[in-house]
Amino acid sequence: MKKNAVFQKFAAAPHILWAILFIIVPMVFVVYFAFTDAEGNFSFSNITTLSRYGNVFILSIAFALIATVICLLIGYPLAYFMSKQSPRMQKVLLVLVMLPMWCNLLIRTYALMALLDNGGILNSFLESIGLSKLPIVGTNFGVILGMIYDFLPYMVLPIFTSMTKLDVRYIEASQDLGCNGWQTMTRVIMPLTVSGVVSGITMVFVPSISTFYISQKLGAGKIDLVGDTIERLFQNPSTYNIGAAMSLIMMILIIISVRILNRFSDDEAESKNKRGGIMP
């Protein structure tokens, strides 16, 4: 037992060191600069200054929520459809969903911008057939579309995984008890796949609320989200501390969001255990 404990500690040491160097230490620096001024003196002025960026926070949260909800509305039916296919077809569809993720996010976003720009492929085609151009790049719709395109796989994959692990006996039992297709979906499948939904929401909402490259390219510099503001503040030495304060608030918002979603998932799992499921 002692040898196993020593081996486990030895095996975990690189991961612990990595977490300390690249997670804890940067967070300590962010907290330090958030509560100090340019001379290194303790100050709350950076936090109070963030009140002028209230609209940026609201816009970022709104965009992230819209993108997350749309990804859920698209991803859940898609994951359900994939789970109903044969194992071979599931692998094919899974590769198609994951295929865009093989490219870097920057490349995917830039390609989408080239596709939707005023002189891009889409508008050039519309103009060639006598239709007016669609102004997408530089609009709120363009930014949200970019979030959906880049982060949709992160919604589909955890939901698909939870559905493939679902015991088919539950579905058969609901049908034996007289449930129709809609009742089986809402009373059996959805409650039993809530963990995948929560994981998908977390994996889409967190990068959506903190993104900056998508809003820069697809927003054409006209839309400022939290990520854009933080990047701009860090580029100027005189506003470096304000950027750290905004990063701290951003981390707190993300942690709160993840905690709420995890608590919801835990409550659902606990209630499911108390019910004992549909079948023994």
Image (cartoon, helix red, strand yellow):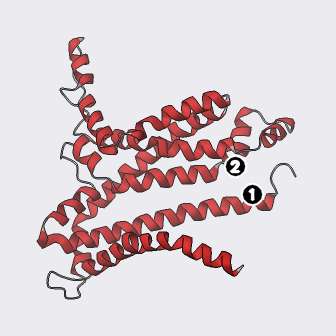
Q: CA distance from mark 1 to mark 2?
A: 8 Å
Identify the residue shown where x is 15% and y is 63%. Answer: 235
- Residues 178 and 229: in front is 229
Q: Estimate the x, y position of residue 251 in percent, counting from the top left.
A: 38, 68
- Looking at the picture, does residue 78 appear above or below residue 37? above
Left or right: where does residue 107 sit relative to residue 235? right
Q: Is residue 68 above or below residue 94?
A: below
Nearest to the observer: residue 170 or residue 131 = 170
**Residue occupying image coordinates x 39% and y 70%:** 23
- Residue linked to disc 1: 272
Horizontal arrangement in the rendering, residue 226 relative to residue 84 (left or right): left
- The quadrant holding residue 161 is top right
Q: Position of residue 133 (x, y in %)?
A: 22, 23
Element under disc 1: helix
Q: Residue furthest front?
A: 3
Residue wearing tag 2: 192
Give the crowd class for mark 1: few <14, some 14-19, many >=20 residues within 10 Å: some
The disc, 1 or 2, on the residue closer to the chain's N-terminal end is 2
In this orientation, which residue lies closer to the viewer: 10 or 192? Answer: 10
Where residue 86 sits, quadrant-wise, is top right
> Which three-letter amino acid code belongs to the residue tagged 1?
Lys
Q: What amino acid is labelled 2 in the image?
A: Leu
Q: Are marks 1 and 2 in contact (CB under 8 Å)?
A: yes
